[in-house]
Amino acid sequence: MGLALLILIAVAAAALLTWKHLESPKRLARLYRDRYVIPSDLDNEAHSLFNRATNATMTVSWSQVSRQGFLDSVANDVLFPQQLWEISRLLRFQSILRAEQAAATRGVVLTPELLAVLAPQQQALQHSVAMVTQRIMELEAYARRVQEADAALRAHEQLQNNDKYRYLLAHTDDRMGMQNLMQQAAAVESTLTQSVQSAIAAGQTLAMPDLRQWR
């Protein structure tokens, strides 16, 4: 009976907890509103920018140089989630402001007074969009550097096949070809090092600024 009582208490507690969270979903939505962004919060322009940002971060996260530990893991594990979160919140706010501006001009005469009020607001919004777009372009530039490092790593791995070509050239008695092959191998080694260092340097410049000034 003691075990049955404990089970009953546990079930009652679980039911109470579930009921508490289901009691007022609107209240919970208001409580945690600043902690999430959903697709329906973004308009088409915001969706396009957010997709560019996520594509860039996914390119880096799934890159070969990242998976093999060549890049600074801080950029992937800390910086990217922070970037996407700040960008998504700004894009949501921009979507709200664009909708408000569209509503302000719908069905009314655009008088000089109304235009005088809307003009600086539109400029502020455009400035915010431009700044966020610039941050996304920097993410894309970083992703491009990482792709270049991936290509250099692929070339480095392909060097493992050089033994076959050296064998081929040796039996062809092509000394010049052998020399060229060795020089190209050395160049690839240098390119890989430079590409990885360039990608790491690019990642270190992606420190998130205080985006709250644009809200």
Image (cartoon, rainbow, N blue to C red):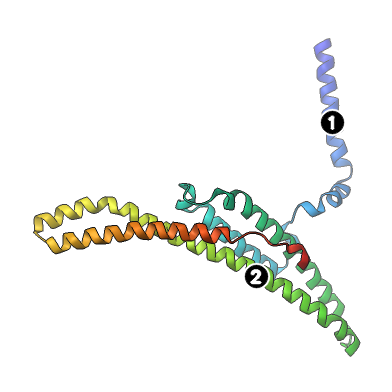
Badge nearest the viewer, 2 or 1? 2
Looking at the rendering, which quadrant does residue 88 occupy? bottom right
Identify the residue position indicated by label 1 in the image.
15
Q: Is residue 105 left or right of residue 64?
A: right
Badge 1 amino acid: Ala
Q: Is residue 169 left or right of residue 80?
A: left
User: Residue 139: x, y in percent?
Assistant: 58, 63
Q: Whole-percent x and y of residue 92?
A: 75, 63
Residue 202, x across and y down, in percent: 53, 61
Q: Is residue 114 visible?
A: yes
Q: Is residue 106 visible?
A: no
Q: Residue at x 73, y 56 (%)?
A: 38
- Mark 2 nearby-residue class (10 Å; few <14, some 14–19, many ≥20): some
Question: Quick check: 31 left or right of 155?
Answer: right
Residue under the point 55% across and 65% down: 140
In the rendered view of the protein, which quadrant contains the N terminus? top right
Check disc 1 and report its element: helix, strand or loop.
Answer: helix
Q: Amino acid at mark 2?
A: Thr
Asked if disc 2 and disc 1 are in contact, CB closer than 8 Å, the reply is no
Quarter of the figure that contains the C terminus: bottom right
Residue with the mark numbered 2? 133
Residue that appears at 65% across and 63% down: 50
Q: What whole-number distance in Å separates the C-alpha atoms at marks 2 and 1?
A: 47 Å
Task: Judge whether 87 appears above or below 16 on screen.
Answer: below
Q: Secondary structure at mark 2?
A: helix
Point out the tag, 2 or 1, that comes first from the N-terminus: 1
